[in-house]
Amino acid sequence: MTDTGQTGLDRGFALLRRLRYPVYLGGLAVVVVASTAAPPAVRPPLVALALCVMCTTYLAELHGRADGMRAEAAVTAVAVAGVAVGAYLLATTNRLGGALFVLGGVLFFRAVVRGTDD
């Protein structure tokens, strides 16, 4: 087996970048359908999952734009956790708090990506 220098995280990000348009369109479709036609008990988890996948795809796009950066699992986990918590809060109770968590996760990842360009 040959080592291409890519981690599983890098390969996962590459897959999300390749599928970004179907992910974004599918995520929007899930949010719309869940918000209008899904039973009330399953709306928040469906919306939170769709938002989390869409935001993680955006993180993958940021990672792809950073030349020579390998994704660090801990940094990515913190960023995705922020996005996931925010997506859940957005879908369930606190829209402002949720938006702040999502924004914080994305900005945290962007800062790390920009910091590696030097």
Image (tube, helix red, strand yellow):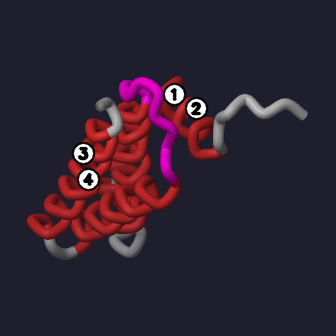
> Which residue corresponds to mark 2?
15
Q: Label 3 near label 2: C-beta < 8 Å? A: no
Q: Residue furthest right?
A: 1
Does residue 81 appear to the left or right of 91 in the view shown? right
Q: CA distance from mark 3 to mark 1?
A: 24 Å
Q: CA distance from mark 2 to mark 3?
A: 23 Å
Kind of element beneath mark 1: loop
Q: Name the residue: 13% across, 65% down.
A: 95
The residue stretch that appears in magenta: 64-72
Tell me which numbered mark, 3 or 1, is placed earlier along the sequence.
1
> Which residue corresponds to mark 1?
19
Tell me the mark number nearer the camera, choosing from 4 and 1. Answer: 4
- Quadrant where the N terminus lies? top right
Q: Label 1 near label 2: C-beta < 8 Å? A: yes
Q: Name the residue: 34% across, 51% down.
A: 51
Q: CA distance from mark 2 to mark 1?
A: 6 Å
Tell me which numbered mark, 4 or 2, is placed earlier along the sequence.
2
Q: Is residue 54 magenta?
A: no
Amino acid carrying label 2: it is Leu
> Which residue corresponds to mark 4?
108
Quadrant of residue 84 within the rendered picture = bottom left
Main SS of the magenta part reads loop
Is residue 38 among the parts visible in the rendering? no
> Which residue corresponds to mark 3?
111
Amino acid carrying label 1: it is Leu
